[in-house]
Image: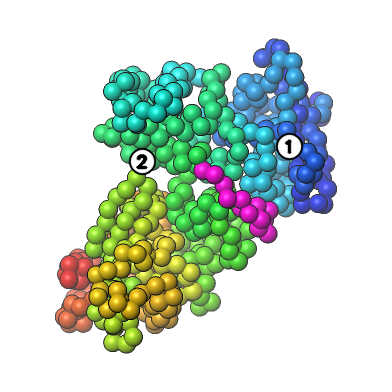
Amino acid sequence: MARYIYSSLPTASSHIRLLCLLPNTDRRAQIRCRIVDYDLSNLQSSHVYEALSYVWGDPTDTRNINVDDAELPVTSNLEKAMHHLRDGFFQRVFWIDAICINQEDLKERAAQVKMMAEIYHNASRVVVWLGEEHDGSFEAMQMLRVIANVQSDKLRGDNVGEILDISGKKREQLLALFQRPWFRRIWILQEVAAAEVVVIKCGDVELSGQAFSSALTSIGTLSRGWDCSELISQVLSVARLLSFTALVSDAPSGITLNYHTLVKLVDIFHNHLATDPRDKIYALIGMATWSDSTMDVMPDYELSWSQVFRNFITSIISADEDAVVNTWDDAQVATLQTKGGLLGKIIRTHQGKDIQTINIATRSIFWRDLYWSILPRTLTYHVTQGIKTIREGDLLCIPRGASTPIIVRVSDSHLSIIAAGVPDPDFSLIIENSMASEHGFGKEDYAEWLASIEKEDKKLFLIWDWHETSPEFKPPERICKLLDDERKSLPTRKERYHSLLRLLQNQTSFPMIVAHFEEARRKKRDDAGLDPQFLKQVLDRVSSD
């Protein structure tokens, strides 16, 4: 049988392909289907298609399905899903990315990816395929159904544990279900957030998205002390998306769901899985609050990963034309050389369910101009929890050309980005500085303060490492190797130390920092830079000041 050949879609941007899954009472029979063209802009239609949310699986493990009497290879996981979804007597109509997009046509792929939020939003329902039954998944799904039913009786989440025994084997079955790769796939975020109606399917068991979300939320309470906080955090992020009501608005890319800014979405979700690393950015665009800078990172699969990552950094993190950004095709790491300044130091943190409340000591004690009288000594921020946890001693800084501040941590000779897309502070809590309270310190004052710090002439050498979840003072060996890459225009270790200490000496009240810096320079081991242990002692004294 000949291989299936895609026909080009009409030039109108609203056209997609739909898959008609033909019925068969024999579940083992080969999958047969038809592909039809469909115009999403047809407002007379009720959009009766369903959209599938699933994990592709091993790309080398494929099976052939019959499409319009021709063969098309799909991954084994998708073929299994189609067997479970096929009806015995009636045709079902689906949108499935691996089949409905010609994956070999990079321009079509980019155009269709821009429409995916709209495709999933317009579907009559989104079917989530978690995989076939194994590792006690049948029992786990039934347990989630029971938990959801208990919640529907309006019992508090804390009481579920008194009614249900979720320990031993039952807990293992639930955790095995949550460890399935679907929960960490980057594309599921947009697919679930955009959906009007969701059905979760694992093997032959189905749960409504509402019941699934309710049960997952209860698990968040029941799991205290389970020693699997990262896994539960991922599960709870899915629960929030299932209950999210999209504030859909038009955008140049189609529609957007207005879940968060793009930089914050990337900050929260960049550790999710993607077959193609470029999708760690592209998969989130449809969820993002639209801004002009988003245009610079629209899907384009003719660009390499390093180019996509560089474009993201220069358009979202620092739009300064003099900034130098280095990225690598084989690493999810970026270095950024720019200028800017520090806003303050984090002196207190409080961890909520998915929000970290942080207090920073501002630079007010160093100002000798207008801000000396009205800038509060402390500011409070409510930051959506990202991959990395913010700690006391971390620093709030603003790179030149940035739209929002970032939180960084001193790591040897550079600053590691801990959180991006930091929102405005809580202006209602500005009460500690009497002058600020009396004269007011509002959004306009804050924006003016950011702009003044952003223009400072201090060098910043930043690293955003997507592989690392908890950067420490001593960077991992792979980062050290990247910093020694002679193909890149990177400052030497000595230059990085010099810039870092110059930045810190002007942002702290530690009066002897210059003397310590001079002593550190005298104790350098070689031309590579300063003695790291001595530098650490200096920085420790600065951070404790």
Q: Which of the 4 image quarters holds residue 127?
A: top right
3 or 243: nearer the viewer:
243
Is residue 131 magenta-colored? no
Q: Do labels 1 and 2 touch, CB within 8 Å?
A: no
216 horizontally vs 376: left or right: right
User: Of the numbered discs in the image, which one, if any, rests on residue 228?
Assistant: none
State which region is magenta. 244-256
Give the residue number, with chain letter if any, for mark 1: 47
How many neighbours does mark 1 have within 10 angstroms: few (below 14), some (14-19), or many (20 or more)?
A: some
Q: Is any part of residue 394 visible from this angle? A: no
Q: Which of the 4 image quarters holds residue 454?
A: bottom left
- The kind of secondary structure element at disc 1 is loop
Q: Amino acid at mark 1?
A: His
- The kind of secondary structure element at disc 2 is helix
213 or 493: nearer the viewer:
213
User: Of the numbered discs in the image, which one, if any, rests on residue 230?
Assistant: 2
Image quadrant occupied by the N terminus: top right
How many neighbours does mark 2 have within 10 angstroms: few (below 14), some (14-19), or many (20 or more)?
A: few
Residue 370 on image: x %, y %: 34, 85
Q: Is any part of residue 83 visible from this angle? A: yes
Q: Which of the 4 image quarters holds residue 399?
A: bottom left
106 horizontally vs 386: left or right: right
Residue 65 vertical placement versus 535 (above, below)? above
The tag earlier along the polypeptide, 1 or 2, is 1
